C-alpha cells in the first residue's frame, strides 16, 4: 500500500521491514554527483512490523522503533519533495500512513518577536527542549529549530528549520536545486530574466519571465520570494548557511524562516512533548514533524509567468506560419513518469535521455487554492519546437536528480513536480453524515465521533498516475479527488467504522459499516489499505478482497434516508443486528 506517485528510492533498506524517517540531518557534498549535494536522512526500523497498524499518534512514539539500529542514508536534495519526517518506508517504497497526529493551530502570530532560530540541542533552564523520552532525533544530528510563541510559551511550537525549507521553498526538484545552489542570489539569470520581471500595482499582479525548465507551481514560490523580504531571507539562508559552514566542516545544518509575517493558520502533523521548563503553563508543547497546509497570504493576488522562446501560438491576428518561425532553444525531451523507475543518488543522470516528471498532488498553500498562473498575451509567436521527430534513446533503468552530464549513465533525470489539487467544500451528504453521527450518541451504549483527518484516509487513493482519468477522481478533468469521511463508533465495547465517500451524480455506491471480528479498533493504516482495494473495485464494497478473506465484516446501506435522524436510526439498527 504505497503512497501515490512516489517512486522507490534505492538508498532505503530493502529488508522487508518498515522504516520511519525520524529526522533530517545535515547537507553534505556528494562526490559522485557534484551537481547536487546529499541530504542526510535519519531512519529507524519498527521493532515489529505489526506496529505499522498502530494509530498515527502511536507511530510517532519513541517505543515503536529500535533506536539502537537508527542510522543515516543519503539522498540527493532533488529528491527532497518525495520525503518527509514521519513518513514510513518498506523496501524503498513510501507508505500511505505517516507518523504523527494532525493538529490545526489558528491565528499563530509570525514576526521577529514571536519566532526564534535555535539549535536542535537547545537547553532551557539546563534541560533539553526536546526531552529524550519525548522524541529521538538521533545522536549528533542537531538540525536547527524554529520556535514559535504560543500561549505565552516562547517554545510553544517547534518546527525543524529544514521542514520550513521543504514545505515553503523546495516544493519540487527544480526548486530544491534553486534553494541549495544559491542561484537566486548569485546567478538569478539561471532562474529568471530580471529585465522582464516586475509588479503591476493596480492589478496586484506579479509578472515573471522564467527559464523554460521551471513549472507554474514553481512560479508561485519564486514570485513570493522575489516579492517579500521575509521570503527572500528564508529562501537564501540555506545556501548562505552552507557557504559559512563549508569553511569549518563538510556538514551544514541549514537555517531558514517563514516567507511572511503576520497571522496564519497551520495544519501540521507531529506530537505533543512534555515541557521540562516552566515556560509552558499547560506543561506541553508541540513538535512539528511535517507542515501540511498554511493559510498565510501571498504578497500578490495574481501571477503572470512567461517563458523563454515560448512556442505557444499567438493570440493576435498577425500569426506567423510555422515556416516563418525560428527554431526555439533545444529543450530536453520529457514525459510524465509512471513512477516505476527507482531513484538513486550514486550516478549523474545522462543528459541525452528523456527527462521524467513525477506529479505530486498538493494543496499546501490556502491563499492560492483554485488560482491559475496566467500566460502573457503575445502579438505573435516567433518560435517553433523542432523536437517532434527526435530519435529515441535506450530506455533508462534508473532516475537521478542531479543536473546530469553526457557520460552515458544508465540513469535519466527525474523531477518531482507539485501539482495543485483543488479542495472543495464538504459535500452536502457529509453534513448529513456528521449530524447523524451526533445523533447516534443519543442511543443507549453508543459513543460515536468523526475520525480526525489524516493524509492516508482523506481521499480515495489514486490507482493510476495523477494525469490519468480514473474512478478515484470525482472529476478527472479538474483532478478533483473523492473525499472520504469516517466515523468511529463504540457499541457494546466493540469498535465499528462508518465510511462514506463522495459520489458523482449517477453513482449508486453505498455507505459501509465495517468492524474487525475481534472488536478491535480499525487503524488508519488498515482503512487506507481497504480504500485502496475499494478504488480498484470502483466503489463496490463487497468486491474488496479483505471482506472475502473474512478479516473484516461488512454491512452496506443504501442512501435511502431523507433525514439525519433516519440515517442514525438505520445505523443503530445495523449495530444491534451485528450484536446478535
Image (cartoon, rainbow, N blue to C red):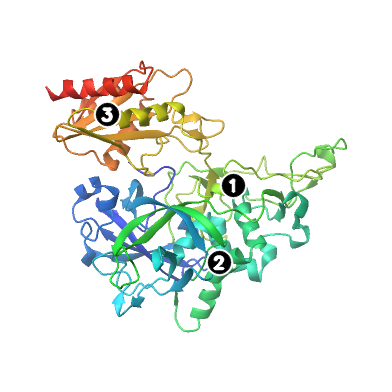
Q: Position of residue 577 (x, y in %)?
A: 17, 20
What is the crowding at mark 1: few (fewer than 14 residues within 10 Å), some, or many (at least 20)? many
The structure residue drawn at horizontal position 51% and vertical position 71%, both measured from the top left corner, is 113
Can you tell which mark lies on residue 234? 2
Task: Describe the element under mark 1 as helix, strand or loop.
Answer: helix
Task: Describe the element under mark 3 as helix, strand or loop.
Answer: helix
Can you tell which mark lies on residue 368? 1
Q: Position of residue 497 (x, y in %)?
A: 26, 33
Could you tell which of marks 3 and 1 lies nearer the N-terminus? 1
The structure residue drawn at horizontal position 21% and vertical position 67%, both measured from the top left corner, is 68
- The mark closer to the camera, 2 or 3, is 3
The structure residue drawn at horizontal position 42% and vertical position 42%, both measured from the top left corner, is 4
Observer-nearest of 2 and 557: 557
Could you tell which of marks 2 and 3 lies nearer the N-terminus? 2
Between marks 2 and 3, how big is the CA–CA gap? 49 Å
Left or right of 183? Residue 523 is left
Residue that carries the numbered disc 3 in the rendered image: 440
Amino acid at each position: 500500500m504505497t503512497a501515490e506517485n512516489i517512486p522507490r528510492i534505492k538508498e532505503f533498506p530493502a529488508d522487508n521491514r518498515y522504516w520511519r524517517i525520524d529526522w533530517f540531518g545535515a547537507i553534505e557534498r556528494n562526490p559522485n554527483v557534484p551537481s547536487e549535494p546529499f541530504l542526510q536522512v535519519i531512519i529507524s526500523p519498527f521493532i515489529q512490523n505489526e506496529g505499522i497498524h498502530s494509530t498515527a499518534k502511536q507511530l510517532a512514539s519513541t517505543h515503536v522503533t529500535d533506536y539502537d539500529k537508527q542510522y543515516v542514508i543519503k539522498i540527493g536534495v532533488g529528491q527532497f519533495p518525495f520525503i518527509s519526517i514521519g513518513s514510513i518506508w518498506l523496501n524503498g517504497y513510501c507508505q500511505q500512513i505517516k507518523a504523527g497526529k494532525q493538529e490545526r493551530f489558528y491565528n499563530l502570530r509570525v514576526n521577529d518577536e514571536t519566532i526564534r532560530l535555535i539549535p536542535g540541542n537547545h537547553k532551557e533552564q539546563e534541560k533539553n527542549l526536546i526531552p529524550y523520552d519525548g522524541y529521538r532525533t538521533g545522536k549528533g544530528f542537531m538540525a536547527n529549530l524554529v520556535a514559535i510563541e504560543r500561549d505565552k510559551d516562547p517554545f510553544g511550537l517547534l518546527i525543524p528549520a529544514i521542514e520550513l525549507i521543504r514545505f515553503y521553498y523546495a516544493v519540487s526538484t527544480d526548486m530544491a536545486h534553486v534553494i541549495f545552489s544559491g542561484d537566486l542570489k548569485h546567478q538569478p539569470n539561471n532562474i529568471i530574466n530580471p529585465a522582464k520581471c516586475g509588479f503591476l500595482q493596480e492589478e496586484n499582479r506579479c509578472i515573471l519571465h522564467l527559464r523554460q525548465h521551471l513549472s507554474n507551481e514553481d512560479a508561485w514560490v519564486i514570485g513570493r520570494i522575489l516579492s517579500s523580504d521575509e521570503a527572500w531571507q528564508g529562501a537564501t539562508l540555506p545556501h548562505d548557511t552552507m557557504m559559512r559552514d563549508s569553511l569549518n566542516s563538510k556538514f551544514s545544518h541549514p537555517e531558514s524562516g517563514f516567507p511572511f509575517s503576520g497571522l496564519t493558520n497551520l495544519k501540521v502533523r507531529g506530537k505533543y512533548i512534555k515541557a521540562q521548563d516552566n515556560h509552558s503553563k499547560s506543561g506541553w508543547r508541540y513538535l512539528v514533524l511535517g507542515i501540511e497546509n498554511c493559510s498565510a497570504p501571498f504578497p500578490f493576488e495574481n501571477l503572470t509567468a512567461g517563458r523563454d522562446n515560448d512556442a505557444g501560438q499567438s493570440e493576435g491576428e498577425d500569426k506567423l506560419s510555422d515556416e516563418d518561425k525560428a527554431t526555439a532553444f533545444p529543450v530536453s525531451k520529457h514525459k510524465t513518469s509512471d513512477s516505476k523507475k527507482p531513484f538513486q543518488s550514486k550516478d549523474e543522470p545522462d543528459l541525452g535521455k528523456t527527462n521524467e516528471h513525477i506529479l505530486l498532488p498538493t494543496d499546501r498553500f490556502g491563499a492560492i487554492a483554485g488560482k491559475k498562473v496566467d500566460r502573457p498575451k503575445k502579438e505573435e509567436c516567433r518560435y517553433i519546437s523542432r523536437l517532434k521527430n527526435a530519435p529515441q534513446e535506450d530506455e533508462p533503468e534508473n532516475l537521478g536528480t542531479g543536473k546530469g552530464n553526457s557520460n552515458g549513465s544508465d540513469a535519466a533525470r527525474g523531477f518531482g513536480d507539485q501539482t495543485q489539487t483543488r479542495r472543495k467544500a464538504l459535500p452536502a451528504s457529509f453534513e448529513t453524515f456528521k449530524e447523524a453521527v451526533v445523533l447516534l450518541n443519543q442511543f443507549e451504549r453508543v459513543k460515536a465521533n468523526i475520525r480526525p483527518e489524516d493524509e492516508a484516509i482523506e481521499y480515495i487513493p489514486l490507482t493510476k498516475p495523477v494525469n490519468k482519468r480514473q474512478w478515484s477522481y470525482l472529476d478527472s478533468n479538474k483532478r478533483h479527488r473523492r473525499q472520504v469521511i469516517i466515523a468511529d463508533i463504540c457499541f457494546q465495547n466493540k469498535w465499528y467504522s462508518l465510511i462514506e465517500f463522495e459520489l458523482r451524480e449517477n453513482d449508486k455506491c453505498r455507505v459501509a459499516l465495517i468492524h474487525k471480528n475481534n472488536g478491535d479498533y480499525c487503524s488508519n493504516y488498515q482503512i487506507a489499505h481497504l480504500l485502496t482495494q475499494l478504488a480498484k473495485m470502483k466503489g463496490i464494497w463487497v468486491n474488496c478482497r479483505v471482506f472475502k478473506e473474512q478479516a473484516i465484516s461488512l454491512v452496506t446501506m443504501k442512501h435511502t434516508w431523507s433525514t439525519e435522524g433516519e440515517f442514525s436510526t438505520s445505523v443503530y439498527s445495523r449495530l444491534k443486528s451485528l450484536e446478535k
